[in-house]
Amino acid sequence: MTRREKAIDKCSVITARILNSNYSFTNQVNDHVSNICLKTNTFRHIVQEDDLTSFLGSFEQILSNFNTVIIERNDFEKSVSTRDDIIVGLEKKVHSQRNSFNESLDYQSQLDDEFRLAVTTLEKENAELKCKIRELNSKLTSCEELINFMQADITEYKNLHSIDTQINDGIREIQTVKRNIAKNVSKQNNNLKAYLCIMTQNVQCLSNKIDSLNVFIRNNNNKYDVLLINEHWMCEEELDAVRINGYRLVSKSCREKRKHGGSCIFLKDSVFENFQVNVKEDLRNGFNKILDFELSLTELVCKSNKKTNLIIMTVYRSDKGKFDEFLSILDELLTEINRKGKYKIILTGDLNVNCLERSPRKDKLFDVFDSHGLVNLINEPTRMYGGTVTAIDYFITNIEQQIVQNKVLSTGFSDHLAIETIITDKLYRRPKKVIKSFTRIIDGNNIERLREALSKEREQTKTPT
C-alpha cells in the first residue's frame, strides 16, 4: 500500500469517528426533547388538575434538565468546532502530502526518463566500444602477422649477413680495380688528342643570338669544329644570310609556313682541310618532315683514314608532331644508312622525350636505338623550365664510349643546356696488335692446393675393401 492510500484510509477513519460522535449527540438531544414534550404533557395534565405545587417542582426540574441540555449542546458545538478544525488541518495535511507525493511522483518519473536516456547512451557507447575493440583486435592480428614476417626477415637477414659481408669485400675489391682502371684510362685519355669538338644547342631563335654565339665561340678559343643547332626559327633565305665567324652552313631544315622549329649544321673552316664533306642532300630530303622529323645531315670522310666514315645528324622533333611517325622515319633512316655502308653515326637533337623517367615513348625510342646498335650518352638534365627538370636533348652514337667525352654546359642562349662532345683521335688510329702471354705462378700456396687436390682425387678413386 502506498503512502497516498494510507493517508486516505486514515482520513476516512477519522471522518467516521466524527460522524458517529455527532450521531450519538443527536440521539441525546432527541431524547431530551422527547422528555420535555412528555413533561409538557404532564404539565398540562397537572395544570388541569390544579396541582400547582407539583407543577412548579416539575417545571423546575424541566428547566434544570433543559439547562443541562443547553450546556451539553454548547459543549458539543465546541467539540464539533474543534473537530472541524482538526478535519480542516487533516485535509490540509492530506492535500500537502498529496502535493508532495505528486511532486515525488513527477521527480521519480523524471529520474526514470533520465535513467532510460543514460541507459540508451551507455548502450550506444558500449556498441561503439565493442566495434573499436573488434578493430583493435584486427589491427593486433595484423601487427602479429607483421611481427612474424619481420622475425622471418630478421632470420633471413642474419643468414644473409655473412653473404653480404663477403659481397661487400668483393665490392671493395672491384672498386679498387675500377679506380686502377680509371687511372689507366685517364692516363690514356690524356695521351689522346681531340680530333673533333662538337657543340649541340637548342637556341630557340638564332637571329637574335648570332653576336652572342660569336662571342661564346671566341671565349672558348674557337675549339668547336661542328655546331649542331635546333630551333633556329628562320626560313631558308634568312638562314643562308647568317654569318658565324670561321664557319660554313652545310645542311639545314627550315619551315616554310609554320613558325619556329628547324635544324642546321655549321662546320668550321679547318674541318674541310682534314675531311671530305659530303652533304648527302638526297638522303636528307628523303627523310626530312616538318614537325615530325626536321633533319640536317652531313658525312665526314677523314682524308688520312678513309676507312672510317662519319655521319653527323641533328634532328628536331616538335612535341606537336606524331611520335609514331617520328619513330618510323628514324628507323627507316638508320636502316638506309647501314645499307649504304659501315658508318660511325652521331645523332643529336631535341627529341622532346624525357629520358630521365620511364615512359612508353622512351621505351619505344630506345628500342629503335638498340636495334641499330646506338647508345644515348646523355643521362643528365638538359632543360630547366617552369620548375621542371628534363633531359630531352640527346647525343646518340655507335662510337665506343672510351673515344667520346661528353659534358653538359650552360650557355645562356635558351632554357636548354648545350652538349659539348669531344671525339678523340683514337677513332682514326689503327688498332695495335695485342700479344698475350701467360705465366704460371708457382708459390707455396699453389703447391699446397695442388697436394690437396691430388689427395682428394686419390680418395675418390680408391675402391672399397
Image: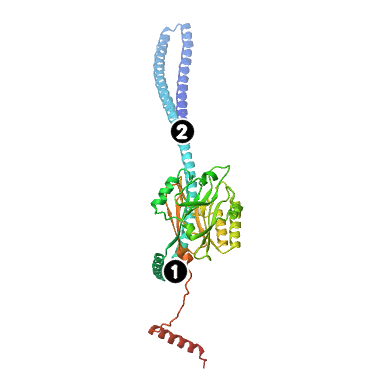
Kindly state the secondary structure of the residue where label 2 is placed: helix
Q: Residue under circle 2?
A: 105
Q: Which residue is drawn at 47% across and 42% down?
A: 121
- Between residue 45 and residue 70, name the one nearer to us: 70
Q: Is residue 133 visible?
A: no
Kindly report the distance in space between the C-alpha atoms of the residues bearing marks 1 and 2.
80 Å
Residue 149 visible, this orientation = yes
Q: Which mark is residue 160?
A: 1
Q: Residue at x 47, y 86 (%)?
A: 456
Q: Which amino acid does label 1 sit on?
A: Leu
- Residue 57 falls in image quadrant: top left
Report the front residue among 162 and 324: 324
Q: Which residue is drawn at 46% across and 32% down?
A: 106
Q: Residue 334 location, x and y as percent?
A: 58, 59
Which residue occupies the extreme bottom position in the image? Answer: 465
What is the x, y in percent for residue 227? 47, 53
Crowd around label 2: few <14 · some 14–19 · many ≥20 (10 Å): few
- Here the colouring is rainbow
Compare residues 196 and 100 and report the one nearer the observer: 196
Q: Residue 194 or 98: which is nearer the viewer?
A: 194
Name the front one of labels 1 and 2. 1
Q: How crowded is mark 1: few (under 14 residues within 10 Å), some or many (20 or more)?
A: few
